[in-house]
Image: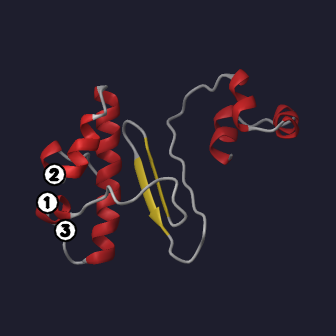
Amino acid sequence: RHPLLKDDLTEKEQVVFSQCRHPDRQRSWLLGRASLKGLLMLQSAPSSNTQHALKAIETTHLNFPNANWSLSHTLDKALAVYCGTVQGIGVDVENNRPINPASLRFFLTELEQTFAASQQLPLLQWWTIK
């Protein structure tokens, strides 16, 4: 899916978008909204796929983290998922990038850090697994 244009946002979404100051953050946020709106549109009207329909779909009522919805986006990728039958779902989309080993302590326990050090997985995989 391509990023939305600012004109494709609802008034409430435009307020949130205006808080994204950096152009990369704006592009990533628009891509995430496109993915989320596409999924919401499929749920409400599977045969509708018009730009007008996208603008009509409001996404600001969804707060994250969310037990049934998950949204992850980077500068050039986005993924939105929904599952109404679980009480916890999550996805993570990451571009291949280095992770500073010192940051492991922020998302892995000491035991997990020891285990990670004994494995051959790149640190980015530990980041996305966790």
Percent of width and height locating residue 101:
72, 23
Residue 111 vs 22, above or below: the answer is below
Percent of width and height locating residue 102:
72, 21
Left or right: residue 110 versus residue 31 is right
Give how far apart the Cα atoms at labels 3 and 2 are: 13 Å
- Which amino acid, mark 3? Asn
Q: Helix, strand, or loop for circle 1? A: helix
> Which residue is tagged 2?
8
> Which residue is tagged 3?
49
Give how far apart the Cα atoms at labels 3 and 1 are: 7 Å
Q: Helix, strand, or loop for circle 2? A: helix
- Which amino acid, mark 2? Asp
Residue 55 vs 110, above or below: the answer is below
Could you say which quadrant of the image residue 28 lies in? top left
Question: Do the residues under discs 2 and 1 have CB atoms within 8 angstroms?
Answer: yes
Percent of width and height locating residue 44:
28, 76
- Which amino acid, mark 1? Gln
